[in-house]
Image (cartoon, rainbow, N blue to C red):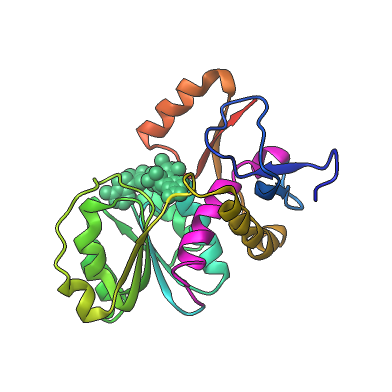
């Protein structure tokens, strides 16, 4: 139960382009200590996405290796920090050296420029030929075969986006030989009860890391709600690193 007048942030049911929103109680979180109300808005969606996928489902564990595609994205910048904090060796892909340098500054161990390097070869090289244990993927079809080739035995691929398409061919032997697991999920279609379970896990496991200063908000730019179109243009340009906020 939250008290009247306490500062909160929330995992919304969907779009948040509004001055006021109604949210189920189970999707409300306190603003983490030391974080401004505005910066707190950058956390619920990314924290719930990353925690519910690579931690709650793919069971990324201390000492394991993680590959994050789009390391400089809103999702990626959060995933790097929490995975590093919990003891993983973190690999990222990004489309420029500037973005890779930023990813390294917040904890990534290995940066791979997807425009100039073959990420499968680089992952193999960096892991002594084994591959990574878990992949957080926002590309879908275009990376599917290469993601499977990049996984270690008992590896887990979690797909959260389809920027590279939704259809591809699958040779089942690619799963069979290395005992691979492939999963995909979105937050929005989950029931309020399911979202509440995730939000409670995030408060228990992620909020202390934010309170300790080990996971920081990465906010590239804020726009007033009236300039939402400008915010979209920036996001489509993909110049940003981290989150873009709309402020009412
Ligand atoms: N399933 C869910 O519940 C859920 C929830 C939230 C978000 N998502 C998904 O997660 C992804 C990230 O979301 P976001 O809001 O953080 O978006 P974002 O900041 O706009 O990030 C998009 C990212 O995709 C990267 N990218 C584009 N082409 C790539 C390629 N060929 N290889 C590797 N990376 C590539 C971009 O990297 P460069 O800029 O370096 O090119 C950028 O970092 C999106 O696909 C979104 O739909 C899913």
> Residue 136 is drawn in which quadrant?
bottom left
Of the pair 222 and 149, the residue shown nearer to us: 149
User: Where is 202 relative to 39, above or below?
Assistant: below
Which residue lies at the image location 73% right of the left edge and 52% below the top edge? 32
Which residue lies at the image location 37% right of the left edge and 32% below the top edge? 236
User: Where is 114 relative to 4, above or below?
Assistant: below
Report the side of 108 relative to 175 (left or right): right
Residue 56 location in percent, x, y?
Answer: 52, 67
> Residue 144 is drawn in which quadrant?
bottom left
Of the pair 213 and 203, the residue shown nearer to us: 203
Report the side of 15 relative to 121 (left or right): right
User: Where is 181 relative to 39, above or below?
Assistant: below
> Residue 124 is drawn in which quadrant?
bottom left
- Residue 41, magenta (yes or no): yes
Residue 103 location in percent, x, y?
Answer: 45, 56
Which residue lies at the image location 47% right of the left edge and 72% below the top edge? 60
Which residue lies at the image location 53% right of the left edge and 20% below the top edge? 227
- Residue 110, magenta (yes or no): no
User: Where is 222 relative to 211, above or below?
Assistant: above
Residue 12 location in percent, x, y?
Answer: 59, 40
Q: Which residues are magenta?
A: 37-61
Report the side of 169 relative to 128 (left or right): left
């Amino acid at each position: 139960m939250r008290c009247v007048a306490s500062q909160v942030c929330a995992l919304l049911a969907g779009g948040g382009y509004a001055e006021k929103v109604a949210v189920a109680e189970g999707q409300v979180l306190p603003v983490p200590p030391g974080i401004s109300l505005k910066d707190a808005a950058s956390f619920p969606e990314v924290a719930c996405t990353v925690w519910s996928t690579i931690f709650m489902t793919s069971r990324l564990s201390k000492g394991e290796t993680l590959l994050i595609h789009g390391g400089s994205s809103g999702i990626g910048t959060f995933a790097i920090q929490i995975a590093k904090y919990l003891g993983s060796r973190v690999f990222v892909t990004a489309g420029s050296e500037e973005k890779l340098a930023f990813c390294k500054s917040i904890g990534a161990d290995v940066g791979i420029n997807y425009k100039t390097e073959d990420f499968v070869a680089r992952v193999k090289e960096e892991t002594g030929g084994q591959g990574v244990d878990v992949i957080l993927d926002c590309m879908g079809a275009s990376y599917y075969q290469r993601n499977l080739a990049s996984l270690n035995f008992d590896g887990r691929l979690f797909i959260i986006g389809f920027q590279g398409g939704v259809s591809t061919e699958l040779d089942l032997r690619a799963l069979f030989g290395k005992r691979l697991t492939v999963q995909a999920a979105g937050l929005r279609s989950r029931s309020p009860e399911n979202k509440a379970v995730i939000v409670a896990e995030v408060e228990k496991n992620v909020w202390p890391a934010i309170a300790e200063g080990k996971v920081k908000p990465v906010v590239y730019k804020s726009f007033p709600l009236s300039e939402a179109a400008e915010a979209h243009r920036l996001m489509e340009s993909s110049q940003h690193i981290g989150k873009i906020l709309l402020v009412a």
